[in-house]
Amino acid sequence: MDDNKAYWKTNLKYLGILLFVWFAVSFGCGIMFADQLNAYKIGGFPLGFWFAQQGAIYVFVVLIFVYVYLMNRLDKRFNVDEV
């Protein structure tokens, strides 16, 4: 039963970290620090606007792939992988 607890503890740690990154990018960059980021431009648009409209979505998609990678590695470590 210790392996189950360690597996889920690590899984929840990964989730917490990735959700924090997503929150920091979507809320922090898109809302809280948008005025400071608007001093810079990407493709002619202010960076704060870009994070609010596009960047948070891109980061979320990247985080999905990071989560899949981390979970595949965790599954192999605990010998519960599908292959």
Image (cartoon, rainbow, N blue to C red):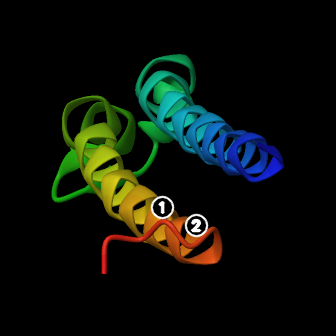
Looking at the image, which residue is at 67% across and 50% down?
7
Looking at the image, which residue is at 33% across and 63% down?
65
Looking at the image, which residue is at 76% across and 40% down?
5
* Image quadrant assignment for residue 83: bottom left
Q: In which quarter of the image is the N terminus?
A: top right
The residue labelled by disc 1 is 71
* Image quadrant assignment for residue 47: top left
Nearest the viewer among 51 and 75 is: 75
Residue 74 image offset from top left, x and y in percent: 58, 66
Residue 56 image offset from top left, x and y in percent: 32, 39
Nearest the viewer among 15 and 45 is: 15
**Farthest residue in the right direction?**
2
Residue 18 image offset from top left, x and y in percent: 55, 44
Q: Which circle marks residue 74 in the picture? A: 2
Residue 12, placed above or below residue 61: above
Q: Do the CB atoms of the residues marked 2 and 1 lie less than 8 Å apart?
A: yes
**Farthest residue in the bottom direction?**
83
Badge 2: residue crowd in 10 Å (few <14, some 14–19, many ≥20)? some
- Amino acid type at mark 1: Met
Badge 1: residue crowd in 10 Å (few <14, some 14–19, many ≥20)? some
Residue 2 image offset from top left, x and y in percent: 83, 47
Nearest the viewer among 35 and 1 is: 1
Looking at the image, which residue is at 43% across and 63% down?
66
